Image (spheres, helix red, strand yellow):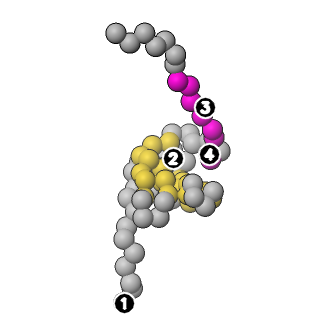
Amino acid sequence: MNTDTSISTWQAELAVDCRCTLGEGPQWDANNQRLYWCDILEKQLHWLSPPLEKAATFSLIIRCHWLRPLKRVACC
C-alpha cells in the first residue's frame, strides 16, 4: 500500500495574453514548432512559437473553430 501523501504541484505561466472571447481548436504543428488556436467569436487565429518566444494574431473574415497547417507548396 502506498502511504505517500505528498502532492506534486505545478505552476502555470501565461504564455500569450490574447484574451480570447471563445478560444478553441488548439493544434500543435511539430514541423514549425508552433501552437495554433482560434478565437471563434473575434474571428482571429493565434499562434505561439515557444522556441522563438514569439506569438502573433491574424484577423479572419469568417468564424472558425479549427484550422490545420498546410504543407508548403511551390507555386507555378
Which of 41 and 68 lies nearest the eye of the viewer?
A: 68
* Numbered range of the magenta stretch: 8-16
Residue holding disc 4: 15
Disc 3: which residue: 11
Instruction: Answer with mark 2 or mark 1, whichever residue precedes in sequence.
Output: 2
Of badges 2 and 4, nearer the viewer stands: 4
Residue at the (34%, 9%) spot, across then down: 1
Quick check: can you spot residue 18?
Answer: no
Q: Secondary structure at mark 1?
A: loop
Mark 2–mark 3 distance (CA, rounded to whole Å): 25 Å
Estimate the spatial distance between the alpha carbons at disc 4 and disc 3, rounded to whole Å. Answer: 12 Å
Of the two numbered discs 4 and 3 in the rendering, the one whose residue sits closer to the viewer: 3
Residue 12 belongs to magenta span: yes
Residue in the picture at 52% in, 16% down? 6
Task: Using the rendered view, name the quadrant where residue 69 is placed.
Answer: bottom left
Q: Nearer the viewer, mark 3 or mark 1?
A: 3
Reading the image, the residue beneath label 1 is 76
Q: Between marks 2 and 1, how big is the CA–CA gap? A: 33 Å
For badge 3, the amino acid type reads Gln
* Image spot of residue 12 (x, y percent): 60, 34
Name the chief secondary structure element in magenta: loop
Label 2, label 4: how far apart the Cα atoms are: 16 Å
